[in-house]
Image: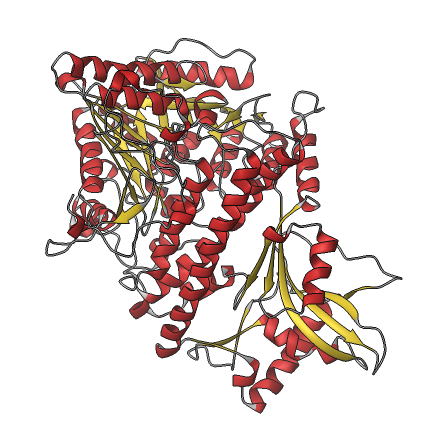
């Protein structure tokens, strides 16, 4: 790829990447594949991905409200990163862990480098917001300060504060009679310095900005008037009502992030439900891993917070402007189509056109005729996966339904269908992963509801997370019992199915069905089968099969045949798989890796990875599907499934990957891979040092993966069947809960 095709402003900064660049290797036989210089750091690679996310806000080619959305997304992503990854490193440091990562870093070294890299990213976000706010103002969407308001507007907002906000506030003062207040995770707080009068002691009080009030308060009553003020500014301007008869000397904002990596020993927990409830309680009081504070905060406030919260100076981030950009999500819902991407409504799947949802026979006949590949959000979740489960729940010929739930929507119709199936006399078994990070509470509620309905529920397994996305329907038919399977890359979650790209295979293949019978028996029993007919299942045969497939390509290349591997995944972290890819490259295999996020492998190293290309698509949808292609000298294998090439996926989780054997469906998968590799609008190319540059179209037509796949999905159904208007069911299908979108499942 020529340098002209790459942007000058899209490369990842050196601060988020390892400083060392390994020397070129002339003799492949002399390569030490354990050399730390051959591996990128997992955490710094994650921050390089977050920089690509932030670039979507910086990129002026994007519509203005799309840029606003990504500013908010970046905040949510970084919040999770600090809670999980930085929190985990602090635990290792506190425990005295000094073990080196594959790239040769101790936990403390990683922690220090992460904080510096994050500091640069937050600075870029602040600069981006200043630019975006100016553009919003020019477009008639204003975020005002208190002094920007007229006296009448100030008076109206003071009334609003007194009636709707003041009763929710609880000022907590720190003095000899009152301990330092507990600061909850991710809460935005106002530090208030007051005194009773001249010469009296200055007191510190904390006022929590309420999370159950709109953070962007509309100015005026006209719904078409897009002027707003931040709630914290309203609180700040009316503190005399909260602190009457005292002098307010200063106010400043701060925000605390706590470690989410709290857990109990699963081996000795009385039960998983007790363990999860305990984790949720502990998380609220966990160690502080980050303090964000207004850049103009007085030294005495900063020093007090550092001391009382017990944070290192390097964990303090002094920021100008907003500390929490998540409230900007509310602006994305504005009725300003001129500032947004054209709306997208997932389309009907062509294979299910004409299938009567009230006639289960028709749906099952369509699957029995040929396998069906569904691709969200291009295909509707409601009229594919949900229809499959609905049909099974109502069909009198269905004997049993089994499903593995990792994450699902808070108002999940999937769960409701399973409950309806049980009421209709089906045998229903559900595997619910209680340890799905940040969804524990939601999943716990569903477990209790399912059990109340008499459904067999497995909570997970000791020592393993269940991350597979599978469902099995057992149906009595004229020629005997038939098995219908769904094996997917994404969750049974109707909301993320509108924003995450995921694939799913609906099949009547008996071998796949029998493999799922084994898998679900493990969930509710106690033994994991070692052999499967077609599925790759972690932690049993998946790693060994992937290693075998990579080595097979290397053998082809060594023997003068074409060796080629194309893998699309979210993360490439496992050192053993990286080593296998290095060996395959040294054997001459052409390797194309489409890795959205973390990547430990360094492409383009002389004598080591010269035949490896790594790229990443970051755009409108979160790339979440996994596709594995092995050329096999012209007799290729295609797989899709739930697992990335991360150690946790291959060794510590229950995952399922299925072959795709139908020639037409393979063509569809190849189209997806080709569209991504040809993308010149949202694709980033990775260099050997771990930096990324974004491809630019130059004089060529723009090729945007997501746009091409939306167009393909639309053109695959007759014009009369296309869902293009935002009304009725289509509106519900296309509405998206943006809170937390674009953060990956863990």
Residue 397 appears anywhere in the view: no
Residue 186 in the figure: left or right of residue 581: right
Q: Quadrant of the N terminus?
A: top left
Residue nearer the viewer, 312 or 68: 312
Residue occupying the far right of the picture: 177
Residue 233 in the figure: left or right of residue 716: right
Q: Residue at coordinates 44% horizontally, 54% vertically from top-left?
A: 73
Residue nearer the viewer, 299 or 733: 299
Q: Residue at coordinates 56% horizontally, 13% vertically from top-left?
A: 526
Residue 566 in the figure: left or right of residue 194: left
The percent coordinates of residue 106 (x first, y second) are 54, 33
Residue nearer the viewer, 30 or 125: 30
Residue 67 in the figure: left or right of residue 555: right
Q: Residue at coordinates 22% horizontally, 16% vertically from top-left?
A: 554
**Vertical placement of 475 versus 626: above or below?**
above
**Vertical placement of 205 versus 630: above or below?**
below
The percent coordinates of residue 6 (x first, y second) are 21, 51
**Vertical placement of 269 versus 54: above or below?**
above
Residue occupying the far bottom of the picture: 151
The percent coordinates of residue 13 (x first, y second) are 37, 50
**Vertical placement of 389 versus 170: above or below?**
above
Which quadrant holds residue 589?
Answer: top left
């Amino acid at each position: 790829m020529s340098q002209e095709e790459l942007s000058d402003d899209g490369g990842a900064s050196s601060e988020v990447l390892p400083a060392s660049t390994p020397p070129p290797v002339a003799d492949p036989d002399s390569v030490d594949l354990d050399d730390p210089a051959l591996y990128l750091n997992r955490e710094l690679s994650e921050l390089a991905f977050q920089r690509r996310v932030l670039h979507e806000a910086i990129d002026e080619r994007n519509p203005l409200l799309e840029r606003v959305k990504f500013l908010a997304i970046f905040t949510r992503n970084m919040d999770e990163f600090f809670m999980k990854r930085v929190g985990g490193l602090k635990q290792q440091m506190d425990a005295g862990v000094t073990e080196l990562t594959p790239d040769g870093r101790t936990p403390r070294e990683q922690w220090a480098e992460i904080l510096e890299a994050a500091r640069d990213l937050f600075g870029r976000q602040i600069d981006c917001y200043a630019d975006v706010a100016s553009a919003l103002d020019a477009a008639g969407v204003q975020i005002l300060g208190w002094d920007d308001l007229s006296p009448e507007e100030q008076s109206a907002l003071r009334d609003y504060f007194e009636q709707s906000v003041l009763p929710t506030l609880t000022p907590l003062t720190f003095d000899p009679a009152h301990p330092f207040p507990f600061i909850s995770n991710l809460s935005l707080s106002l530090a208030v310095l007051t005194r009773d009068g001249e010469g009296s002691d200055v007191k510190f009080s904390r006022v929590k900005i309420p999370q159950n009030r709109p953070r962007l308060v509309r100015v005026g009553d006209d719904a078409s008037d897009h002027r707003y003020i931040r709630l914290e500014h309203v609180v700040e301007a009316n503190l005399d009502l909260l602190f009457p008869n005292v002098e307010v000397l200063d106010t400043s904002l701060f925000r605390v992030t706590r470690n989410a990596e709290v857990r109990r020993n699963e081996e000795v927990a009385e039960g998983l439900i007790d363990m999860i409830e305990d984790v949720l309680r502990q998380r609220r009081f966990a160690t502080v891993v980050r303090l964000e504070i207004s850049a103009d905060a007085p030294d005495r406030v900063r020093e007090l917070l550092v001391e009382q919260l017990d944070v290192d100076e390097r964990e303090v981030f002094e920021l100008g402007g907003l500390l929490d950009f998540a409230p900007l999500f509310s602006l994305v819902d504005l009725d300003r189509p001129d500032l947004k991407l054209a709306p997208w409504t997932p389309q009907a799947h062509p294979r299910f056109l004409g299938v009567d949802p009230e006639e289960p026979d028709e749906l099952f006949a369509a699957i029995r005729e040929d396998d069906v590949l569904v691709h969200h959000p291009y295909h509707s979740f409601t009229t594919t996966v949900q229809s499959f489960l609905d049909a099974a729940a109502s069909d009198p010929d269905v004997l049993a339904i089994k499903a593995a739930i990792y994450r699902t929507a808070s108002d999940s119709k999937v769960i409701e269908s399973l409950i309806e199936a049980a009421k209709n006399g089906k045998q229903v078994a559900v595997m619910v992963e209680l340890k799905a990070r940040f969804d524990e509470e939601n999943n716990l509620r569903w477990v209790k509801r399912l059990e109340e309905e008499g459904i067999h529920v497995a909570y997970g397994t000791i020592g393993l997370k269940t991350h597979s996305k599978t469902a099995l329907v057992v149906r009595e038919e004229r020629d005997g019992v038939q098995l219908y399977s769904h094996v997917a890359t994404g969750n049974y979650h109707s909301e993320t199915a509108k924003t995450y790209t995921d694939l799913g295979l609906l099949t009547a293949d008996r071998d796949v069905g029998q493999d799922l019978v084994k898998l679900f028996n493990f969930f509710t029993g106690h033994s994991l089968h070692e052999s499967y007919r077609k599925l790759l299942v972690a932690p049993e045969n998946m790693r060994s099969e992937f290693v075998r497939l990579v080595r097979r390509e290397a053998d082809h290349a060594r023997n003068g045949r074409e060796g080629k591997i194309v893998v699309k995944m979210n993360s490439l972290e496992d050192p053993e798989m990286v080593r296998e890819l290095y060996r395959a490259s040294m054997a001459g295999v052409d390797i194309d890796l489409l890795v959205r996020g973390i990547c430990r492998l360094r492409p383009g190293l002389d004598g080591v990875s010269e035949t490896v290309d790594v790229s990443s698509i970051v755009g409108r949808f979160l790339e979440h599907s996994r596709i594995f292609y092995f050329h096999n000298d012209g007799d290729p294998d295609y797989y899709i499934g739930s697992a990335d090439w991360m150690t946790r996926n291959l060794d510590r989780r229950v995952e399922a990957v299925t072959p795709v054997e139908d020639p037409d469906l393979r063509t569809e998968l190849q189209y997806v891979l080709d569209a991504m590799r040809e993308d010149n609008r949202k694709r980033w190319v990775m260099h050997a040092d771990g930096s990324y540059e974004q491809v630019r179209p130059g004089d060529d037509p723009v090729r945007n993966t997501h746009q091409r796949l939306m167009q393909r999905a639309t053109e695959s159904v007759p014009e009369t069947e296309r869902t293009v208007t935002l009304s009725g069911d289509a509106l519900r299908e296309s509405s998206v809960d943006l809170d937390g979108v674009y953060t990956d499942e863990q």
